[in-house]
């Protein structure tokens, strides 16, 4: 009887799936309902509405602040909303949904402890159920390159090489001409 060997499992490759860095609970905070006639920001009414708003619904979530109507919103209004969101949210940003997801993801990537990847052969998973922003692939490569033995893109059985640490001695012009 022939024994099958799982060469991928024995290869020592570490597969990193960027889907794990997507925000788990992301919600919108839309300024539109807080505006007079959903178009005009009246400071006194705006402040009163924010004061009575249920901020606990955002607890532990990633929130993107947006305005889905064509209104002129002063910078201080976004600042005021952030002052209410900061104590309860995981993180918050003024953005569109797509941009917020990308920014929250890159923030998660930047916070990883890279030491567990030192000297390792890493495959950044390339195919999945969810579309991963190109910026996230770039961010993880930038983060891991200084410490990884190699970085590849794709699946362990079919990868595209991105980076491989060179173990040979670097030659300088002075070494070449003095030998």
Image: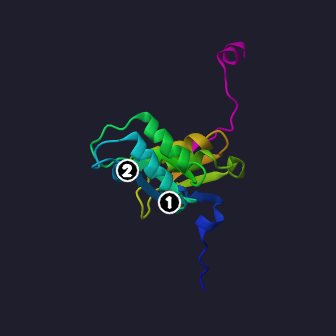
Residue at 38 percent of width and 49 percent of height = 31
Res 11 seen here:
yes
Pick the quarter of the image with the C terminus.
top right
For the magenta stretch, what is the residue range?
163-179
**Horizontally, is 68 left or right of 114 in the view?**
left
Q: Which residue is mark 2?
A: 34
Secondary structure of residue under mark 1 = loop
Label at residue 70: none
Residue 128 location (% of width, % of height): 44, 62
Question: Mark 1 packing: few (<14 Cα in 10 Å), some, or many (20+)?
Answer: few
Q: Earlier in the sequence, mark 2 or mark 1?
A: 2
Q: Which residue is mark 1?
A: 54
Secondary structure of residue under mark 2 = helix
Residue at 48 percent of width and 45 percent of height = 81
**Horizontally, is 39 left or right of 29 in the view?**
left
Res 161 seen here:
no
Q: Which quadrant holds residue 177?
A: top right
Residue 132 location (% of width, % of height): 44, 54
């Amino acid at each position: 009887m022939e024994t099958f060997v799982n060469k991928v499992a024995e290869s020592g490759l570490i597969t990193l799936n960027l889907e794990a860095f997507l925000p788990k609970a992301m919600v919108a905070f839309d300024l539109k309902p807080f505006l007079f006639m959903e178009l005009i920001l009246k400071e006194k009414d705006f402040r009163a509405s924010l004061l009575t708003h249920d901020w606990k619904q955002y607890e532990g979530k990633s929130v993107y602040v947006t305005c889905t109507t064509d209104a002129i919103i002063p910078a201080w209004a976004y600042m005021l909303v952030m002052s209410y969101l900061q104590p309860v949210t995981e993180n918050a940003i003024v953005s569109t949904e797509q941009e917020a997801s990308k920014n929250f993801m890159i923030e998660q990537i930047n916070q990883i402890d890279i030491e567990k990847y030192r000297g390792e052969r890493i495959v950044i998973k390339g195919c999945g159920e969810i579309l991963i922003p190109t910026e996230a692939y770039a961010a993880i490569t930038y983060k891991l390159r200084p410490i990884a033995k190699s970085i590849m893109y794709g699946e362990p059985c079919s990868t595209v090489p991105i980076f491989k640490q060179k173990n040979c001695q670097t030659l300088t012009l002075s070494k070449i001409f003095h030998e």
